Image (cartoon, rainbow, N blue to C red):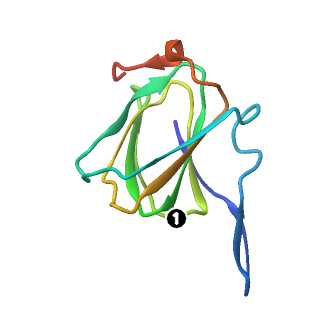
Amino acid sequence: MPKLLQLSTFSSDKGNLTVFEKILPGELKRAFYIYGVASPDQQRALHGHRKESNALIALNGHCRVFVTNGTNEAYFYLNRPDECLVIEPGDWHIIDEFTKETILLVLSNENYDPSDYFFDRP
């Protein structure tokens, strides 16, 4: 099941610096971001991964993430750039309730591989 982590953040009169390190197993191999979602009702993801782990960070705005592994399920609300939701292999998820200004960063420990995806909810 996923883990919501507080990222190390250092604040000063110059602003904030948030560090992402040693969160995903292996090395970072891919990064992408989702933005400009037209409606809060729009759903993204609707899939899981067999071997890939992902870290989701709402850099701006907010969104909701539903995650299930077939046994457990949970909702997470991402609205802080110093929080990170780690979705593990076997976790199926939906992302929705985007605000117009949401920028959701996704970091992955695997390169894109269509055979790693599963679409049927467990």
- Picture layout, residue 82 above or below residue 23: below
Question: 113 left or right of 74?
Answer: right
Q: Residue at x 52, y 64 (%)?
A: 80
Above or below, 83 relative to 41: below
Q: Residue drawn 38% across and 54% down?
A: 63
Identified by mark 1, the residue type is Arg
- Left or right, 100 with reference to 118: left
Q: Quadrant of the C terminus?
A: top left
* Residue 5 position within the rendered picture, expressed as x and y whole percent measured from the top left: 61, 54
Relative placement, left or right, of 63 versus 83 is: left
Give the class, few, some or many, for how many residues have Cα within 10 Å of label 1's Cα (few <14, many ≥20): some
As drawn, the residue found furthest toward the front would be 36
Q: Secondary structure at mark 1?
A: loop
Q: Quadrant of residue 62?
A: bottom left
Q: Position of residue 82 (x, y in %)?
A: 61, 63
Q: Nearer the viewer, residue 58 or 89?
A: 58
Q: Residue at x 33, y 60 (%)?
A: 99
Residue furthest to the top in view is: 115
Position of 68 relative to 20 (above/below): above
Residue 96 drawn at (x, y percent): 32, 47
Residue bearing the label numbered 1 = 80
Number of on-image labels: 1
- Where residue 3 sits in the image (x, y, percent)? 56, 45
Q: Nearer the viewer, residue 82 or 38?
A: 38
**Residue depicted at x 60% and y 21%:** 51
